[in-house]
């Protein structure tokens, strides 16, 4: 991350009230960017956006990415040089409960953002955040690369694969270079963890709530392997992509994976055991009873391209990630300020470069 690049830059972040969006805004603010956010109100109580007072150093606007005219007005007013699109329905299980809402938000929301940028005509770089779930999961033991087939069998995965196709269509139809067209990239991360996530049906928040209540964690698929990484890891990659798109253009307008080392992809049960051990309280875990929607067992990402071309690499190993996550939640439980905790980890992370 190049702090001097972001100093004074006009940046639009959609989904800024969510977990990753709030962390991204704090990063951008720390580097001196002029941040404008567009999102629905935070969907959990508590939430990081409110707890860390993210909105105090930016313009925060409530709106729905499914509303093209609202998105277009925001892009016209913000006149962003760089856009980070994170607004999404981000939970696999919620996509089973509300498939059409998931598809309309993740697919048409992406199309609306790109259409708003096309209408505005000033933006230089757009980074669209999709997901590691956008790949056609074949339960392989090896990692998916950017050229692997897109697909999915649950509504969430399909919505993210479709969002990738929407980006490709807009890039090739309207943003293919020349005439000041913005450069657009998609970014795909592993399973992101960190302090300040209180969403339902996510492993770390569920584990923290169970620890605080002194009960076992209920796990749907304890043997499912995922590429766990601290939230600052992919965000640092997103920022690098934004810098390259803005400064060097369409040579960087493609898909990018950001993932931990392959050996740091661990089963769900392993992560819960290590979170509890780091907390100093072993409440254990039990298999969840009753029907469970389908989830894939093996998922790993290959980020060789980001390492070779962007010079990006993870700075935290899995044990360090666990320690940072537990430290954030435990200190916050004891009364520490959420902004101070985030800012402290941002500074520590920057010092690891």
Image: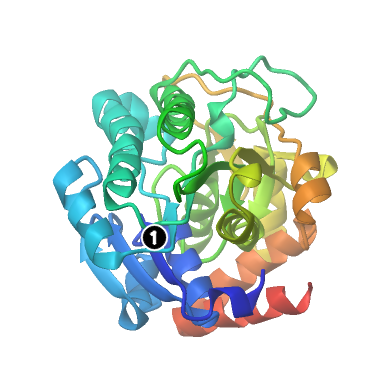
Judging depth in this view, the residue of 297 and 76 nearest the camera is 76
Horizontally, residue 11 falls left or right of residue 317, namely: left
Residue 53 sits in quarter: bottom left
Query: Can you give x and y, in whole percent of width and height, for residue 349 in the image?
Result: 70, 73
Query: Can you give x and y, in whole percent of width and height, for residue 35 in the image?
Result: 38, 72
Query: Can you give x and y, in whole percent of width and height, for residue 204 in the image?
Result: 55, 53
**Which residue is pictured at 45% across the width and 69% down the height?**
25
Query: Can you give x and y, in whole percent of width and height, for residue 237 in the image?
Result: 65, 56
**Which residue is pictured at 42% across the width and 50% down the height?**
86
Dot 1 lies on which element?
A: strand
Answer above or below: position of 28 versus 103: below
- Give the class, few, some or many, for how many residues have Cα within 10 Å of label 1's Cα (few <14, many ≥20): many
**Which residue is pictured at 51% across the width and 85% down the height?**
340
Q: Is residue 231 visible?
A: yes
**Circle 1 is placed at which residue position?**
13
Judging depth in this view, the residue of 192 and 285 nearest the camera is 192
**Which residue is pictured at 62% across the width and 19% down the height?**
137
Q: Is residue 280 visible?
A: no
Q: Which image quadrant: the C terminus?
A: bottom right
Residue 175 sits in quarter: top left
The figure's colour scheme reads rainbow
Horizontally, residue 296 falls left or right of residue 332, namely: right
Residue 198 sits in quarter: bottom left
């Amino acid at each position: 991350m190049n702090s001097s690049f972001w100093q004074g830059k006009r940046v639009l972040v959609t989904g800024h009230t969510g977990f990753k969006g709030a962390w991204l805004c704090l990063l951008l603010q720390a580097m001196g960017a002029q941040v404008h956010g567009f999102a629905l109100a935070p969907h959990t109580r508590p939430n990081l956006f409110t707890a860390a007072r993210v909105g105090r150093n930016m313009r925060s606007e409530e709106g729905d990415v499914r509303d093209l005219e609202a998105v277009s007005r925001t892009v016209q007013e913000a006149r962003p040089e760089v856009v980070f699109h994170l607004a999404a329905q981000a939970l696999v299980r919620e996509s089973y409960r509300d498939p059409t809402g998931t598809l309309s938000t993740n697919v048409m929301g992406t199309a609306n953002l790109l259409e708003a940028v096309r209408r505005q005509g000033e933006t230089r770089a757009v980074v669209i955040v999709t997901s590691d779930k956008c790949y056609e999961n074949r339960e392989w033991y090896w990692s998916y690369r950017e050229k692997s087939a897109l697909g999915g069998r649950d509504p969430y995965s399909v919505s993210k694969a479709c969002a990738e196709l929407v980006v490709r269509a807009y890039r090739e139809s309207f943003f293919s270079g020349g005439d000041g067209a913005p450069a657009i990239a998609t970014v795909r991360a592993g399973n992101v963890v960190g302090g300040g996530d209180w969403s339902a049906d996510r492993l770390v928040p569920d584990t923290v709530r169970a620890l605080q209540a002194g009960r076992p964690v209920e796990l749907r698929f304890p043997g499912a392997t995922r590429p766990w990484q601290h939230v600052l890891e992919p965000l640092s990659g997103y920022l690098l992509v934004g810098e390259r798109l803005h400064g060097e253009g369409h040579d960087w307008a493609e898909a990018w994976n950001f993932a931990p080392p392959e050996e740091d992809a661990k089963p769900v049960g392993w992560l819960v055991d290590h979170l509890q051990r780091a907390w100093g309280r072993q409440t254990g875990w039990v298999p969840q009873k009753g029907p469970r929607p389908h989830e894939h067992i093996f998922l790993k990402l290959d980020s060789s391209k980001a390492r070779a071309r962007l010079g990006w690499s993870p700075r935290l190993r899995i044990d360090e990630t666990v320690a940072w996550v537990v430290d954030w939640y435990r200190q916050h439980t004891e009364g520490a300020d959420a902004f101070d905790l985030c800012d402290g980890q941002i500074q520590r992370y920057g010092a690891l470069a």
